[in-house]
Amino acid sequence: MVDANNSIKTSILGWMVLCSLVIGSHCLSDSDYPWTYRCIQDTKDGPACQREETESNSTEKVPFNICILTCGPYASLWPYPSGRVELGQTLTGFVLDRMVFSPASLPGESNETLFRMVGEAESIFNGHIRALLPENHVDPPIPVRNVVIQLNIELSDTKLTLNTDESYNFTIISALQQVSVTISGKTFFGVRHGLETLAQLIDFDSERQHLQIVNSVVIEDKPMFRYRGLLVDTGRNFIPVSDLKRLIDGMSYNKLNMFHWHITDSNSFPFDARRVPQMIKYGTYGSEKIYTPEAISEFLVYSNQRGVKVIPEFDMPSHAGNGWQWGEKEGLGELSLCVNAEPYQDYCIQPPCGQLNPLNNNMYNILGELFRDFLDVFDKDVFHMGGDEISFKCWLKYPHIIEWMETNNKTIMDLWGLFQENALTKLKEANDGRPIDAIVWTSEMTSHAREFLSPDDYIIQIWSKATDDLSTGIYQDGYRVIFSNNDTVYLDHGYGPWRGNYVNPAVLIKTWQVIYANDILGQVENLVGREKMMELYESGKLLGGVATLWSEKGDKYNMDMKMWPRGAAYAERLWSNPPSRLNVTQLAYPRLIHQRERLVQRGIHADTLLPEACRYIWGFCDNNYS
């Protein structure tokens, strides 16, 4: 399994003697433990490393993390590759100073931005490998062996889009004095994923005191879904950009590529809209809880570098309260209705209420200015317009709305349609007429009034249950679709109500097993049949999914543990699309536990999945009641 020689043994024994002399009899090194680890292929959960006792000074001992590098068809890889995977069963030792990048092969038209991004990706990778080494580590004498990494990129793309090719090919070939790693992809973003894969094939061997790399690898990999995302809500509870960066880091470690930023809500409007400064004056929790264009711009660069596109959601016409109260004071009339109205049950689904006034032309002018502010900062190819939980009760409280409906012989759905058409027009105008994809949540409109939502303009994000047959018409009409089923991927569920005492069974916690089993293609097939499902998938209409973390009871302090490692489970579902016929944990559980440890090692405060002892004595903790 691993290289070993007498000089290494002598060096380790020497360090142990020094430790004993300096620290005393309580000094204990990894070499003192009597355990070695062996890959067991046929545990209940597939291949896993299991502890066995051996002589404490044996040079053949294999640490747990080193065993994992070659255990099973996917070893320590997360998410597992969707295509060809050939992993060698032996390792090669090396020291960090001998790992180098050859000059990257870039397209002839490559630009300064691409060159910088490649250099930064190499730096991030080096940081991950360096972090594997113990503090004050000194390399032992081992045979000279270079690890040379070659990156090949075909296209000059530097922005992630809905159509970016994220595939990559990957090889490791080992010779006597050199390990050659080649990562090739159409775009930077595919090659970046390849670097993450490489980092998962390297670890520090505490027995031999040097790094180990799998010495023979062939991988052909690409995501099964192009849209693989997480949502965080910063409208209800503010989350600083520094903490959102940590979320982006976690996404990059799991090859997730879309951050759905629910940035505004009726609770607050923390986006610093320079054309409409009244919004943050009336809509923020305090001067330090604002997202400035400068901070957002830097955050977008940070995210793009790590293979993540940031998609803002400006929720409307509902979920638009605080921030909109100033209209009457400035002679513009009520821009939003029912703002902070009580009792809230008479006006909206949850407090505080607020819903834009669809018959106030000044509101549309303000909306257009806000769109311009958003598009000055965020990418201009896709924008989330919200569109869920519209309260008819709110609008029907106002005489001018009832009068308009009666005079024009219109329904409440016609009024909503009027708003949607005007809002989309303002969005397109703000984008100077360039094409832009608008995303909306499923709603009464997507169920019963899709004539207001052209499939050419809109992507529909489904948040109803996976079995909800109201989605059937959306599939039949050929919309592009994103899945965020509330019965499977709502990460905020399960922590108790934030008002009242009633615990709704529908909002129990979504375990990683439920999330991992959320078979997107299967749920579509169940509603429209396999032939139609395959037609939608192959034509790119089934974009992917987003797991959501609404923040009624979430903030920067508990975001990580609610998001991870369940978000990692969803990442493998979206990247690899595991066959639904497999046991949900087959080939996943041991690797997910190791991925959780990797996240923690890299600074993510991920929730734990099991008692630590069970990780090391895999198989002995198995029963239906654990």
Image (spheres, rainbow, N blue to C red):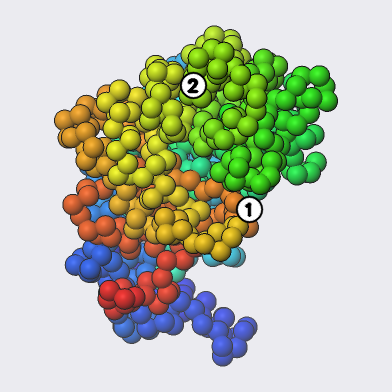
Residue 190 shows in the view: no
- Residue that mark 1 sits on: 556
Relative height, residue 397 to residue 618 (above, below): above
Relative height, residue 538 to residue 11 (above, below): above
Residue 222 at x, y = what percent? Answer: 31, 36
- Residue that mark 2 sits on: 411
Quadrant of res 499 = bottom right
Q: Left or right? Give the position of 300 relative to 439.
A: right
- Measured in 3D between alpha carbons, the distance from the residue under mark 2 to the one under mark 1, in whole angstroms, is 43 Å
| 321 or 202: nearer the viewer | 321
Camera-near label (2 vs 1) is: 2
Circles 2 and 1: CB distance less than 8 Å?
no
Quadrant of res 49 = bottom left
Q: Residue furthest top?
A: 433
The number of discs equals 2
Q: Left or right? Give the position of 103 relative to 113.
A: left
Amino acid type at mark 1: Lys
| 121 or 620: nearer the viewer | 620
Residue 455 at x, y = what percent? Answer: 38, 19
